Image (cartoon, rainbow, N blue to C red):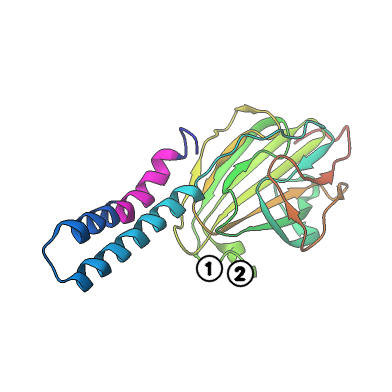
Amino acid sequence: MSARTWPIARRYAAPPATVGALLVLAGRALAQPRSARRAATRLGWGLLAVGAGVAAFFRDPDRRVGEDPTLAYAASDGMVTAVAEEADEPWLPGGRGRRVTVFLSLLDVHVTRSPVPGRVRRVTEHDGGFAPALLQRAQGNHRLRLLLDGPSGPVVVTQVAGAIARTISSWVAPGEQLRAGQRLGLIHFGSRTDVTVPVEAEVLVARGQRVHAGVTPLARLEAGEAGA
């Protein structure tokens, strides 16, 4: 957990942990029948475990990230659920690109990272539904889109909210210069990311493969293709 994720984690983890601690204390202190005290204690420990699990969800580990400027790395941890050889993407040259979709389960780290070094050219937030992130229709969910102008071409990162918390925290702004693997933000609970590269790029992953943000190469970009 980091200074950025702790305030968010506290918002979700504190309520069950606080109630759990009170129940544990009540189970030990109140003059109630033994069965009631045991029930309160068991429930209290269960809620404390929930609070600890929620806090663990917001972990933000340091890691050694990739530095090859001709590669686009994974923007999130998770499993590749789709690879589109051609997809509509108006922010890329020709309005088309190759899109890699990664689903983040509740067990994955949900901090997202920049797939390439470069400047943030555009950031837009889109309202939408809140379908489960694993479903195809989640493409229309609430989402945050970023256009990154990398040394080997433009790359679009889309962070998609899921059906639980429905929230995305963004940590970058237009005009900011990013390093490869630099943290972009946090998608709260179940979610997905789309990384879309120019059609000339070579996709290096396949459906069903597990990837790690900033570490796993998703695509090899064509050197010399300047961002628009």
User: On the image, which quarter does residue 16 sit in?
Assistant: bottom left
Residue 30 forms part of the magenta stretch: no
Instruction: Give amino acid for label 2.
Output: Arg
Residue 170 relative to residue 63: left or right: left
Residue 51 relative to residue 60: left or right: left
Check if mark 2's residue and mark 1's residue have beta carbons within 8 Å: yes
The front one of 19 and 8 is 19
Point out the tag, 2 or 1, that comes first from the N-terminus.
Answer: 1
Instruction: Give amino acid for label 1.
Output: Ala
Residue 12 forms part of the magenta stretch: yes
The front one of 47 and 174 is 47
Q: Which mark is residue 137?
A: 2
Q: Is mark 2 on a helix, strand or loop?
A: helix
Over which residues does the magenta segment extend?
Answer: 6-17
- Write down the residue under mark 1: 131
Q: Residue 6 carries which label?
A: none
Residue 45 in percent (x, y) is at 34, 59
Q: How crowded is mark 1: few (under 14 residues within 10 Å), some or many (20 or more)?
A: many
Most common secondary structure along the magenta stretch = helix
User: On the image, which quarter does residue 102 sit in?
Assistant: bottom right
Above or below residue 135? Residue 165 is above
Q: Residue at x 28, y 51 (%)?
A: 18
Above or below residue 62? Residue 103 is below
The front one of 206 and 37 is 37
Residue 74 in percent (x, y) is at 72, 46
Q: What separation in Å lies between label 2 and label 1 (alpha carbons)?
A: 7 Å
